Amino acid sequence: MTSRHRGLTEPAADAAIDAACRNLRLPTMRGQFSELADSAARDQMTYRGFLAELLMAECDDRNRRRSERRIKAAGFPRDKALRTFDFEANPHIDPAAIHTLATCEWVKKGLPLCLIGDSGTGKSHLLIALGTEAAMAGFRVKYVLATKLVNELVEAADDKLLTKTIARYGRVDPLCIDELGYMELDRRGAELLFPGAHRARGEEQRGHCLQRVLLLLDQDLHRPPPLRRHRRSTHLWRQHHRDRYRLLPSGPNPRPH
């Protein structure tokens, strides 16, 4: 163990701290040390207090960068946040229920979330916003269009890579599937998509592990007949089954997603 260097001048101490932070890969501490040191001297902070400030700054910045990487990896087509969602334009959507979903407890429990409603009622906004909240909470999230997912599953089945493909999607939670209502599923596509999503919960050994799925279903004229629903007032409805939520807007005032 090397002996401590004592009696360093201020410039020498700054250079040593800079080198040490580079070596230990502490970019935030390296960038903020001088400012925090001056602030600590003015506020007469203890050594422990100063060290805590440095470490918390590094941890906070690392968490922020991790969240940004997870959001980028999710592949969202655009940025959407709950704070920008217009609840006044959708008065039947309960803000409290949406913000409860934003805590991601349903993701932790492995429960699916299904958003169903007319076109232009903000379902895609909520899908991306809730997915973003999950990424910020530390979950691995993936956004995919239903058409892309079904095509990928069909191609994987043809190439005898279905188990591997589903396992790859199963490593994220939640998987955000958008625009299911805009496509017409044939029998094969439906069997690949839906059985894989629900069998995952009890039969992971079979390779079907699409867990914690967040489905976005659009109730509008594009919906194929088997998927249509009667129009209802906008509300978030929790079914008798404990693991399902539905968003059922009637959409009298269409607005872009």
Image (tube, rainbow, N blue to C red):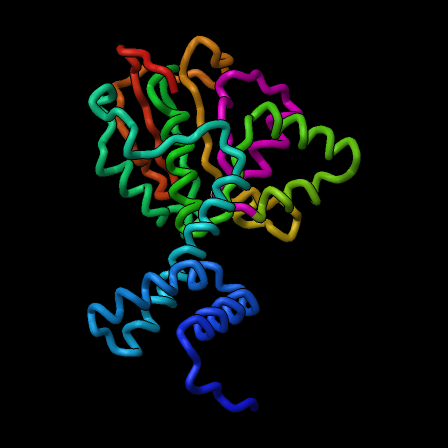
x, y (%) of residue 103?
32, 47
253 sits to left or right of 129: left
Q: Looking at this view, is 111 or 143 the one in front?
A: 143
Residue at image location 43% in from the left, 38% down from the top: 131
Residue 73 versus residue 194 in the image, above or below: below
The residue furthest right is 159
Residue at image location 43% in from the left, 19% down from the top: 218
In reply to whether residue 2 is colored magenta, the answer given is no
59 sits to left or right of 48: right
Q: What stretch is highlighted in magenta?
A: 172-197
x, y (%) of residue 159?
79, 34
Residue 59: quadrant of the picture: bottom left
Residue 97 versus residue 18 in the image, above or below: above
The residue furthest top is 221
23 sits to left or right of 213: right
Q: Looking at this view, is 86 or 191 the one in front?
A: 86
78 sits to left or right of 254: right
Residue 199 versus residue 86 in the image, above or below: below
x, y (%) of residue 88?
20, 22
In reply to whether residue 187 is colored magenta, the answer given is yes
Instruction: Give the number of callouts.
Output: 0
Q: Looking at this view, is 113 or 1 the one in front?
A: 1
Image quarter hosting the C terminus? top left
Image quarter hosting the N terminus? bottom right
Q: Looking at this view, is 35 or 158 the one in front?
A: 35
Residue at image location 47% in from the left, 14% down from the top: 223
x, y (%) of residue 114?
41, 32
Residue at image location 46% in from the left, 32% down from the top: 215
Residue 50 versus residue 225 in the image, above or below: below
